[in-house]
Image (cartoon, rainbow, N blue to C red):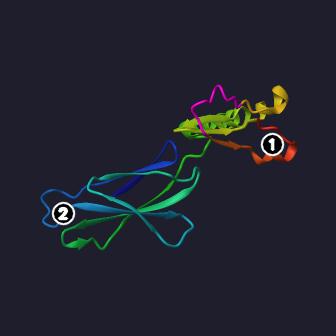
């Protein structure tokens, strides 16, 4: 018997009954396959020696079919256990929704404020929209601040470059 339980962050926990210990040809490992419900062919996902497997990286609100095959040192079982399960929608998946909102917030902050990194002797600066709102659009690369750096990379988002001409230094 195979059971599929939809979980947070677009995952499905597959659980099945492990082979009994007293069976001569008991299973020692299991292969897991999956597909979208409307697809024809299965894709190998992974294998395990346990009687459970967490499938990650699925699409929210999507129906999947999973198949588990038992194996031992003599080969694979002829039959597969299958289960059809639908992942949680974005509305139902509280953790994925929180993650999506956090990513959107970080993207908004990067777009507005930009980002600056110093790796070895290189300054890598991505300009944000706020860069063009201060000091007549200068990027603020002062020699005093970066006296130990000898390489500079400045990234200008295309959307900003199209709108106006910029003075970098």
The residue that mark 1 highlights is 160
Which residue is rendered at x = 54% and y = 64% of the image? 37
* Disc 2/disc 1 C-alpha distance (Å): 64 Å
Image quarter in which the C terminus is found: top right
Dot 1 falls on a residue whose secondary structure is helix
- Please tell me how crowded label 1 is: few (under 14), some (14-19), or many (20+) other residues with Cα within 10 Å: some
Residue 34 position within the rendered picture, expressed as x and y whole percent measured from the top left:
45, 63
Magenta region includes residue 166: no
Magenta residues, start to end: 141-150
Q: Is residue 108 above or below residue 19?
A: above
Magenta region includes residue 142: yes
The residue that mark 2 highlights is 26
When asked about the image quadrant of residue 45, the answer is bottom left
Of 149 and 162, which appears nearest the observer? 149
Q: Is residue 81 above or below residue 55?
A: below
When asked about the image quadrant of residue 30, the answer is bottom left
Which residue is rendered at x = 87% and y = 44% of the image? 163
Tag 1 or tag 2, which sits nearer the N-term?
A: 2
Q: Is residue 33 above or below residue 17?
A: below
């Amino acid at each position: 018997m195979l059971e599929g339980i939809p979980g947070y962050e677009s995952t499905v926990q597959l659980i099945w009954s492990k082979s009994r210990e007293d069976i001569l040809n008991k299973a020692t490992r299991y292969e897991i396959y999956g597909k979208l419900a409307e697809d024809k062919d299965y894709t190998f996902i992974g294998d395990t020696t346990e009687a459970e497997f967490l499938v990650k990286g699925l699409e929210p609100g999507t129906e999947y079919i999973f198949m588990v095959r038992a194996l031992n040192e003599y080969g694979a079982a002829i039959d597969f256990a299958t289960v059809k399960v639908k992942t949680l929608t974005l509305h139902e998946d509280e953790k994925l929704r929180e993650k999506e909102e956090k990513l959107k917030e970080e993207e908004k902050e990067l777009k507005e404020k930009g980002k600056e990194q110093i790796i070895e002797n290189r300054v890598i600066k991505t300009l944000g929209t706020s860069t063009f709102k201060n000091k007549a659009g200068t990027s603020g690369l002062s020699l005093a601040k970066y006296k130990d750096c000898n390489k500079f990379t400045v990234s200008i988002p295309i959307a900003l470059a199209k709108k106006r001409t910029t003075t970098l230094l």
